[in-house]
Image: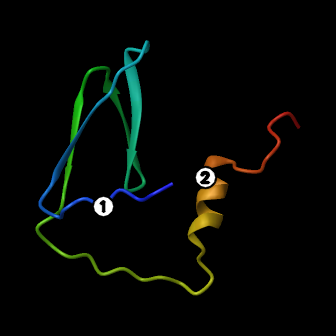
Amino acid sequence: MRPIIVSDESVLRFTIEGRSKKFLVSLDSRSTAVDAGISLQVQKAPFCARLVKFSTYHYFDTLREKLNWGYDMRN
């Protein structure tokens, strides 16, 4: 799989579609229910964020935990 490279001047728009009337959108550890058909827009912020990364932090471990990768849900 190749990564998608997007210019920092780009604006990305997403439209949510499906059989449900409501969807859960989660961004930056915040979640909210939105109506079907809503359009989300993402673009570069006009400021920089300073982040701290702990030496014990591993991105894929966190992703695996949040998405339950490798867990047998039948148990």
Q: Position of residue 71 (x, y in %)?
A: 79, 47
Residue type (three-letter) at the residue carrying disc 2 = Lys
Q: Is residue 64 left or right of residue 48?
A: right
Q: Nearer the viewer, residue 11 or 74?
A: 11
Which numbered disc, 2 or 1, marks the residue closer to the eye? 1
Q: Quadrant of residue 52?
A: bottom left
Q: Residues within 10 Å of mark 1 (few under 14, many from 20)?
A: few
Residue drawn 26% across and 76% down?
A: 49
- Image position of 14 with respect to 6: above or below: above
Residue placed under numbered mark 2 in the picture: 66
What kind of residue is marked 1?
Ile
Colour style of the rendered protein structure: rainbow
Query: Residue drawn 56% across and 69% down?
Result: 59
Residue positioned most to the bottom: 55
Q: Point out residue 4 in the picture as x, y percentages from the top left corner.
A: 35, 56
Give the answer, above or below, for where 1 lies relative to 55.
above
* Number of numbered discs on residues: 2
The quadrant holding residue 6 is bottom left
Q: Residues within 10 Å of mark 2 (few under 14, many from 20)?
A: few
16 and 47: which is toward the camera: 16
The residue where tag 1 is placed is 5
At which x and y percent is residue 31?
Answer: 40, 43
- Of the two numbered discs 2 and 1 on the same chain, state the one appearing first in sequence: 1
